[in-house]
Image: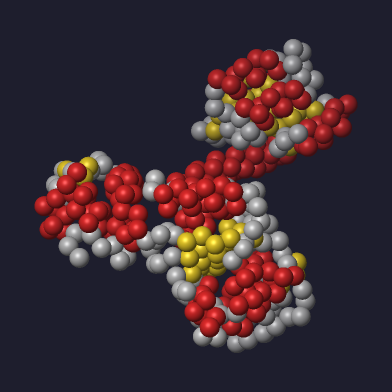
Amino acid sequence: MSKILIIEDEAAIRRVLNKILSEENDVYNVEEAEDGLQGLEMIMNNDYDLVFCDIKMPKMDGVEVLEKVKKIKPEIPMVMISGHGDLETAVNTMRLGAFDYISKPPDLNRLLNTVRNALDRKELVVENKRLKKKVSKSYQMIGESAAITHIKEIIEKVAPTDARVLITGSNGTGKELVAHWLHEKSDRCKAPMIEVNCAAIPSELIESELFGHVKGSFTGANKDRAGKFEAANGGTIFLDEIGDMSLSAQAKVLRALQESKISRVGSDKDIKVNVRVVAATNKELKKEIAAGRFREDLYHRLAVILIKVPSLNDRREDIALLVDFFSQKIAEEQGGAKKTFSNDAIQLLQEYDWTGNIRELRNVVERLIILGEKEVSKNDVHLFASK
């Protein structure tokens, strides 16, 4: 049941609003405040899904209430109530963050539509915050080794800039974590981060995937379609496994970096894009350049900042932290209690040859949690984590 607060000094208006909302199939729990000061206190001490607030009130006017609410609980939609002489002020409140305004006396249909729209918006805001928190948690960089500490320091310096970054390292080392940290710590974090796995897209489709196409440009192009660069406009595009990109697509990416514009497949119309490019590869690009499979000019455009992610074998001191992190995460995912690992179990895991890096360690930890004892022992590691 949605909880709604009405802040209004006129008792008649409060009654009308309360009656309309309370009769809406009993889906709204409506509370009232007689002035702005009382209303603000109620907002601070309760969780409301929507607030109606009159503009002209004693003790504290609606504009002041709006400004304070936007500072303490910005996710609450505020709908301002305006008399005929308050319309200009009501419009100005929209610039301060009000969701909408309604005039006195309230129109039934407009009121209910505003309520539904405002509650939908509140739900979206809350869900977006939940997802963002989930995403941030999913891409934590776990480790205190010198190598990981160095990478974190580089990210702190580079993220606020628009410098292009090339991330290198073996499969499973966590190159995508570095890319996500770069985006989330940048000024572009509110815009999208679009990921493209260049190795997973057939070479004949990679250009369409990146730059879009116009209807009829090739078989199966039944309608115009925007590409990943357009989708990432204002944000970040992460080109994973860029070493597998075709030379023709490389030429178009180079143009996008040089001129900040792209053109869809089958079109000669230029489209301006404002995109930060972060790329990653598990290949030695200088060897690929020597073999004629990668453009040297594109390499130099991408590698303004180089970040090499170490293998797990090169940061064994982080294994204990990673095991603890994965144990907690797996327990949350599976709804069970977190399992602990004995010291000798951790020591044995630190001695293994982790060719699959962190991805392999995560799988082994999950296997040990499922098959091992309440406290995972060295014997469990011997039995279930054998290579």
Outermost residue to the top = 59
Work out which quarter of the rendered image holds the C terminus and state it. bottom left
Task: Pick the residue in front: 339 or 145.
Answer: 145
Give the residue displayed 18% in from the left and 43% down from the top: 342
Give the residue displayed 48% in from the left and 50% down from the top: 150
> Vertical placement of 382 versus 341: above or below?
below
Give the residue displayed 28% in from the left and 62% down from the top: 354
Task: Pick the residue in front: 288 or 228.
Answer: 288
Query: In x, y percent, where is residue 237?
Result: 59, 63
Q: From the viewer's perspective, tell me whether residue 239 is left or right of residue 145.
A: right
Q: Is residue 234 visible?
A: yes
Give the residue displayed 49% in from the left and 79% down from the top: 287
> Vertical placement of 77 versus 355: above or below?
above
Q: Can residue 31 be seen in this view?
A: no
Q: From the viewer's perspective, tell me whether residue 324 is left or right of residue 85.
A: left
Mark count: 0
Q: From the viewer's perspective, tell me whether residue 240 is left or right of residue 312.
A: right
